[in-house]
């Protein structure tokens, strides 16, 4: 299907409405009116003011009795719900409600009585909402943070209480309602149960710590507009709602609500997620009376009746005018958000058809040397025009300056001999032929492929598309003896050399699909002075937080014991880069580099070791290996600087490659890159490779101004290649001394190594 047909598709806003003063669900008329106003869902309280009053009396009496007797009493027991305590009952509509637990409970209270009663109330409400058929429930977040005034105890209590509630209703979708950051006036002005306690209440700090709320969320999970670094941390979390109160909006020139540009950009960013959060309008109206009045007005209009003053007050009546204005005001928020929805950048064709569905979806790296790929896999690779355009440009540049540089050819007729090794279904063969046509330089093209099924397809392509200009060979490139000049493979064969080796063996981390080993194995057919496309490639990495992927891996461990020791290919999307760019320490750092062809001395050393001329090897060689592949082992030790506190779940890996560097004129290198900061300049919109992710078993939580030290090895035993990685967190305690605050285990992919 033509991608142009998809240009105007944008992420859809799902709008909800929440009223913190509402103590009973909307009736059918009110619910219909709020849906007609343009929202998709509303929140519904589970219990009402009657239940709140009962619980307050219970707590007050218990605390008074304990004070009077000066003894420790057993915890107060919250009585069961009665029909007077709730207006939520099983119905057809209840499954569409988002239930809201009582905001006046304080699960994190330092008073054990308040904490116990709050926990009981939550359990009662969860159990009852689950019985009624509610599918999702919002639990108000803790009002104090782990990093403030000894809040760790309260956060631990809160986390345990939520875990207990989740066990009561395992099928409910639990949503924690917590501010993106703490600031007076941002949260609901509800009087908590803890105000009944005589326990000292911590004074509000005048200093705003924007990361304290995220700290609390992180603790719960493991047992103005905020700055961009904080937005990125929340972007990586499993957000379900973005709650927008009236204070979030400003008035535009016409007096209608509008969001500042920074808030718009934040929403646009979140809406690119595969599971985008819903937008919850909080305390911006309308009240239930407005909804009822609107329904009555519509009923009168539909019936074409004239109501008397006794039946229905005129619109001039102040109360009716207020309720009507309340609904009109709410609709201005909805209309604005619907308008904002249309201001988003449309999803690209690739985002709609491929990229969005691949967000944070784990894929095992390919084993191209041991497995034969299917046609569908090749087809996915071939769907990226950017990569093949760059390869064609590299071939074109190489051919254009071939004779200018005084290079000889390996053919008898002066044609440049090109071998496409690992040809697959032949896209690089096509591009090599196009480069020859564009430059007018004659070529002889050989397509070498070990996959017997792809070999059949290549023969057909040569017959139908390439006009017999290509010689197709079925063999592992490392076993290929070169172009057959005379004779037959069985009778007096004479083999020639190749001038240009073209390959697409790169993996997400450059070398993780064994490009170095493959090109070493075929280099014997390359003529002296011959070139390789690509000629070099580098691996890069950066520590990241990705809670969703970590949770996914935890679920895989029972059936995949090596889940945390596997480098996964994944389109990383909901992530937070932990490091910042500082002098001498970029956010993305190079691990190592490979170049081709390797020096002749290295090839001789390989042959000597394989023949047993050198014992033991060294460096990367392991027990039982002769070290013939030692030259392809690598090591790096990198330091990343983290200004703000946070958590990491592993390392994101990328690569860059120089396909060809022109040697004449003042031309730029022909490159491809997945490096997040450089891809738009070097190979914009290239999608052939997703990043690689090196996980760690236990997340590392680190304080502000931490240095994360990453150590990684590329190891080999001559038959396999694997990676080992270690992350350590250090923080400075003085100008001259630092201490280690956390460390991962030494992770190793040896059990899932890439086979040579």
Image (cartoon, rainbow, N blue to C red):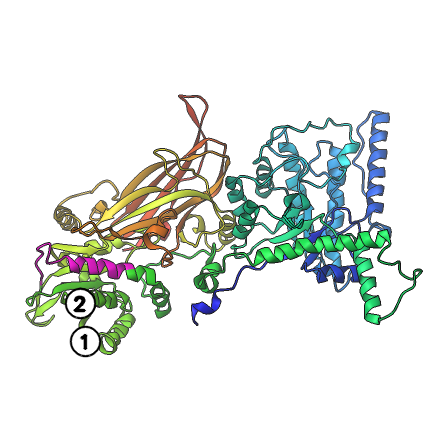
The image position of residue 451, as x and y in percent, is: 27, 68
Residue interval drawn in magenta: 390-410
Residue 34 left/right relative to 449: right
Helix, strand or loop at label 2? It is strand
Question: Which of 18 and 472 lies nearest the eye of the viewer?
Answer: 18
In front of the other: 487 or 588 = 588
Confirm whether residue 225 shows in the render: yes
Q: Is residue 399 left or right of residue 414?
A: right
Q: Residue furthest front?
A: 253
Q: Give x and y (percent) for residue 179.
A: 63, 42
Q: Which residue is mark 1?
A: 468
Q: Is residue 400 magenta?
A: yes
Q: Residue at x 14, y 67 (%)?
A: 444
Residue receiving disc 2? 445
Q: CA distance from mark 2 to mark 1?
A: 10 Å
Other-residue count near label 1 (Cα within 10 Å), few / some / many at <14 / 14–19 / ≥20: few
Looking at the image, which residue is at 61% across and 28% down?
207
Q: Quadrant of the N terminus?
A: bottom left
First of labels 2, 1 by sequence position: 2
């Amino acid at each position: 299907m033509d991608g142009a047909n998809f240009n105007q598709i944008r992420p859809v806003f799902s709008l909800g409405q929440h009223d913190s003063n509402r103590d009973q669900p909307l009736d059918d008329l009110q619910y219909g009116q709020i849906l007609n106003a343009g929202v998709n869902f509303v929140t519904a309280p589970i219990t009402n003011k009657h239940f709140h009053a009962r619980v307050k009396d219970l707590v007050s009496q218990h605390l008074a009795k304990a004070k009077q007797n000066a003894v420790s009493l057993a915890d107060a027991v919250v009585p069961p719900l009665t029909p007077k305590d709730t207006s939520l009952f099983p119905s057809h509509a209840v499954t569409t409600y988002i239930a809201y637990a009582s905001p006046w409970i304080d699960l994190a209270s330092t008073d054990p009585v308040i904490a116990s009663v709050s926990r009981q109330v939550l359990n009662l409400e969860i159990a009852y909402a689950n019985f009624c058929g509610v599918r999702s429930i919002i639990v108000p977040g803790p009002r104090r943070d782990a990093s403030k005034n000894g809040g760790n105890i309260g956060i631990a209590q809160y986390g345990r209480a939520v875990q207990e509630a989740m066990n009561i209703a395992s099928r409910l979708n639990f949503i924690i309602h917590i501010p993106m950051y703490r600031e007076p006036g941002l949260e609901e002005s509800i009087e908590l149960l803890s105000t009944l306690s005589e326990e000292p209440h911590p004074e509000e700090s005048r200093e705003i710590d924007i990361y304290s709320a995220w700290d609390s969320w992180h603790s719960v999970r493991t047992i103005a507009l905020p700055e961009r670094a904080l937005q990125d941390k929340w972007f990586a979390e499993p957000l379900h709602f973005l709650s927008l109160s009236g204070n979030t909006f400003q008035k535009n020139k016409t007096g209608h609500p509008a969001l500042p540009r920074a808030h718009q950009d934040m929403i646009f960013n979140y809406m690119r997620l595969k599971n985008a959060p819903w937008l919850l309008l909080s305390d911006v109206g309308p009240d239930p009376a407005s909804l009822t009045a609107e329904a009555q007005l519509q009923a009168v209009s539909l019936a074409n009746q004239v109501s008397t003053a006794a039946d229905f007050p005129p619109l001039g009546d102040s109360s009716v005018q207020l309720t009507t204005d309340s609904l009109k005001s709410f609709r201005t928020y909805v209309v604005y958000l619907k308008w904002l929805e249309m201001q988003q950048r449309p999803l690209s064709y690739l985002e709609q058809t491929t990229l969005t569905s691949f967000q944070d979806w784990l894929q095992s790296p390919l084993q191209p040397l041991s497995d034969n790929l299917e046609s569908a896999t090749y087809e996915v690779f071939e769907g990226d025009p950017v990569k093949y355009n760059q390869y064609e440009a590299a071939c074109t540049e190489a051919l254009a300056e071939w004779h200018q540089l005084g290079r000889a050819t390996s053919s008898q007729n002066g044609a440049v001999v090109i071998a496409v090794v690992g040809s697959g279904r032949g896209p690089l063969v096509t591009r090599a032929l196009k480069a020859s046509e564009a430059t007018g330089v004659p070529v002889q093209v050989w397509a070498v492929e070990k996959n017997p099924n792809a070999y059949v397809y290549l023969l057909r392509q040569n017959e139908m598309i390439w006009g017999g200009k290509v010689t197709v060979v079925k063999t592992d490139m490392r076993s290929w003896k070169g172009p057959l000049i005379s004779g037959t493979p069985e009778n007096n064969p004479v083999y020639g050399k190749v001038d240009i080796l073209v390959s697409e063996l790169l993996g997400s981390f450059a070398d993780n699909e064994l490009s170095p080993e493959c090109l070493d194995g075929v280099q014997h057919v390359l003529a002296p002075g011959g070139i390789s496309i690509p000629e070099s490639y580098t691996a890069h990495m950066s520590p990241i937080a990705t809670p969703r992927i970590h949770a996914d891996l935890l679920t895989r461990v029972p059936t995949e014991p090596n889940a945390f020791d596997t480098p996964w290919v994944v389109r990383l999307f909901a992530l937070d880069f932990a490091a910042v760019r500082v002098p001498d320490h970029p956010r993305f750092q190079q691990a190592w580099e490979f170049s081709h062809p390797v020096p002749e001395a290295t090839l001789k050393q390989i042959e000597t070791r394989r023949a047993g001329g050198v014992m033991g090897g060294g460096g990367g060689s392991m027990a039982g290996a002769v070290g013939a592949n030692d030259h392809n082992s690598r090591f790096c030790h990198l330091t990343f600087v983290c200004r703000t506190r946070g958590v990491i779940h592993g390392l994101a890996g990328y690569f860059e490659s120089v396909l060809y560097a022109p040697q004449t004129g003042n031309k730029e290198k022909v490159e491809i890159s997945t490096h997040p900061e450089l891809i738009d300049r070097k190979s914009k919109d290239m999608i052939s490779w997703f990043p690689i992710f090196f996980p760690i078993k236990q997340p590392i939580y680190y304080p502000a101004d931490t240095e994360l030290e990453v150590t990684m090895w590329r190891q080999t035993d001559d038959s396999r290649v694997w990676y080992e990685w270690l992350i350590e967190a250090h923080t400075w305690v003085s100008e001259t001394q630092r201490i280690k605050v956390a460390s991962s285990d030494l992770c190793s992919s040896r059990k899932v190594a890439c086979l040579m």
